[in-house]
Image (tube, rainbow, N blue to C red):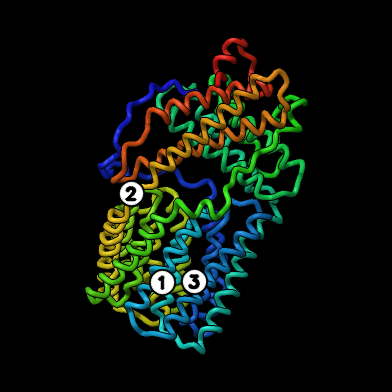
Amino acid sequence: MSSATPTSVTPPARRLPLAGVLRLGRPSEIWFKPALSVVASIAPPALTLSALGRTDLVMYAMAGSLCALYAHNRPYAARAGVLAWVVLGMLGGVAVALVAASLTGSAVVLVTVGALLAAAQKVLCDATRVGPPGHVVLTFVSSASLFAPQTLGQVPGHLALTAATGAWAWLVCMAPALVRPHGPERRATAAALKAAAVYADTGGTREGHARARAAGYAAVQAAWQSLLSTSAPSRTKRALERLVVRAEAALAAPTDADAGRLRAWAGSLRGTGPVPRAGLPDAAADELLGVDAGRPLRVRLGPLTPLAVRTALGCALAGYASLALGIGRPYWALVTAASLYQANLALTWSRAVQRVVGNVVGVLVFLAVVPLAHLGPVALVLCCLAFSFGAEVLISRNYWLGSVCVTPMALLITEFAGHQKPGALMTERIVDTVVGALVGFTAALAVTNRRAGDRVERALTAADRARQHAARLLAEPAPGAAALESARRGLAVALAELRATADAAAGEWWQRALPQERVVLVEQSGHRTLAATARRQGLLPDRDPATETEDARP
């Protein structure tokens, strides 16, 4: 429960951050999964084509292989479907690009097609919440394919190769299910427990409590999404659900939570051992099911309209600017612009800085390794494998650090069609990076997101209604256990959505002042009601009835 003093209404932030943009964070706990998967997906087809003397086809093989980067946080039943859609999305983007390349040689037309593809890929990836690496890999592959020499007769064969390697990537990513079938759900639940423990350490009042609480609810929501993405019941899934409920209860009342116990539960989820019992009351245990708070796809598409316009406009203008400068690979500028666009302008600015720094350093790394890559086709493939592995190792620490590996890999891919002049290649890459970042960010400034404030108002209304509903149930003498659980989960989701919406809106420019004071007040009252609801369910130690009534007042 937060005791922060409400702040006054303030205008949105106007300064773009520099401090901390390049700061390194902690690596992802599962960095090795996408890293090993992409290597296992790329190596067999790339090495086989090299042995056959067809390195010119490696690019099309890598298009499907790169699908192995996706969905590693999804349970395997859900992962199967998500990966299938990613492969189909990759195949669709490459098909459009190859057909366009075979029908026209106009660079302006090809850049326009690439920009529209980038916007569609950005919106669909964000709306479906496909997760990292998002649209960037899809846009990189389809944009590069636009400028690959092509005839209509070659298109079916190239698409077949992409489809085959995509199927191989699907098999690689699904293979761990044979060893640890509930691994993703266990990791998501452990992350929720750890985040709840971090918030419990703050007591809900000490320094960093607001950030810890937001991170905790985000982790809990991710855990519910993981558990609810599959409908098949199991004893393991049921036990994990109870642990997530415990994490959620700790977030509602951090002063009553046992951080050490939460961490112990999280630690016990490693490996394949039995899931610990959460110790929920028997009367409530059978009713504690997560509420699926996912919104329909069409509802999630609406708020993404400004991002779609920014992406299409920024990518097109970046490509045109590159053409005007006489650069032979305008898709590099296009992809740079596409990679910038985040949830708000402040985050977009941070990504622009990270992209430029990472690419410049990556170009220097390319200069160091290009003599090794020129030793032969196998050496070239091995260098690409090393950089693809390194990118996944580093990118979760900071985007710019991952770009240090992505940049030389992208440059080396051009070598499969024939050796390039390193000096010219490096110059073009740096110029296109700077052009793409400048033009792309300018487009983000030009296309304002004035709907951000409206979404905050709607989130405030939704959170207040959810709180009032929970408070009415608490006032009843004998509310049903299922109704209480549904109300508590609905309120928790509404508060998490409110915080995420407010944070996203705070990073936008050219909009009216945000109702920061109302946001804080609604959050405070909502979290008090969450705590009272959790106690009524028997999830927390009992408190004085007068205090509980005060906490849950409508």
Q: Residue at x 62, y 46 (%)?
A: 226
Residues under numbered marks 2 and 3 in contact, where contact means CB atoms less than 8 Å apart: no
Query: Which residue in the structure is indicated by mark 1?
Result: 143
Residue 96 locus on image (x, y percent): 48, 76
Amino acid type indicated by mark 1:
Ser
Seen from the viewer's position, the closer of residues 18 and 365 is 18
Amino acid type indicated by mark 3:
Gly
| In this view, 127 is above or below 545 | below
Task: From the viewer's perspective, tell me whether residue 512 is left or right of residue 227.
Answer: left
Query: Which residue in the structure is indicated by mark 3?
Result: 93
Query: Which residue in the structure is indicated by mark 2?
Result: 345
Mark 1 or mark 2: whose residue is earlier in sequence: 1
Seen from the viewer's position, the closer of residues 11 and 399 is 11
Q: CA distance from mark 2 to mark 3?
A: 27 Å
Residue 7 locus on image (x, y percent): 35, 26
- Residue most extreme to the left: 325
| In this view, 243 is above or below 305 | above
Q: Residue at x 71, y 27 (%)?
A: 280
